[in-house]
Amino acid sequence: MNILVLNGPNLNLLGTREPAIYGTTTLADIEAACAAHAARLGLAVTCAQSNHEGALIDHLHAARGAMAGVVLNAGAYTHTSVALRDAITATELPVVELHLSNTHARESFRHVSLIAPVCLGVIQGFGARGYGLALEALHGHLTGAPL
Ligand code: DQA
């Protein structure tokens, strides 16, 4: 089973972008760790990143019928994008919303997620480790494996 790990705007700068909030792990490090962790779970990952809302939507459309699930860090589009929310619904796939930071402990405009209601669940506040947690959550959801 193949999982799309999709990262949105500004996440290409991970490692150097506000490291006090987002840590020092780069996106390349995260993608490599996702591939290794997925392999341990018997999954495969396809990783993609874009700073553009439409490109993220195109990735979700391509995942429809081709992937088993999605780990999505939509970055700031989480808080603004009805179009991204509609694309998540259109995938008919289990999508795990992910954030490195705990958005509820930050500015009030980050407290609202437009995508959370159409996602399987949300993992946030655990830094890069969250990507592994999200893959485990999807693995459990897809296989029915117990805790
Ligand atoms: C983020 C949280 C968002 O509010 C922010 O706009 C990001 C990163 C996170 O991973 O913590 O770009 O999604």
Image (cartoon, rainbow, N blue to C red):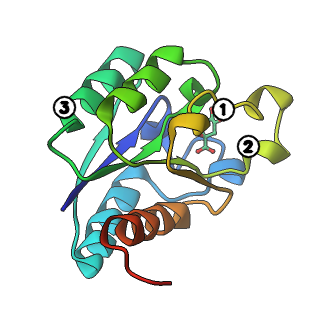
Residue 135 lies, with reference to residue 124, above or below; the image says: below
Residue at x 85% of width, y 30% of height: 108
Query: Which mark identifies residue 20?
Result: none
Q: Which residue is mark 2?
A: 103
How many numbered marks does the figure carry? 3
Instruction: Identify the amino acid type marked 2.
Output: Thr
Left or right: 58 with respect to 65? right
Sequence-wise first label, 1 or 3: 3
Q: Which mark is residue 62?
A: 3
Q: Is residue 22 above or below residue 135?
A: above
In this image, 77 relative to 42: left or right?
Answer: right
Q: Residue 13 placed where, x, y %?
A: 48, 39
In 3D space, how far apart are the residues under numbered discs 1 and 3 (Cα atoms)? 23 Å
Disc 1 residue type (three-letter): Ser
Q: Is residue 77 left or right of residue 86?
A: right
Residue drawn where x is 50% and y is 31% of the image: 10
Q: Which residue is mark 1?
A: 113
Asked if marks 1 and 2 touch (Cβ < 8 Å), the reply is yes
- Give whichever of discs 1 and 2 has the lower sequence position: 2
> Which type of secondary structure does the marked residue at label 1 adopt?
loop
Where ligand 1 lies, by image quadrant? top right
Q: Label 3 is placed on what type of residue? A: Ala
Q: Position of residue 63 (x, y in %)?
A: 22, 38
Q: Is mark 2 within 8 Å of ligand 1?
A: yes
Give the residue displayed 38% in from the left and 61% down from the top. Answer: 29
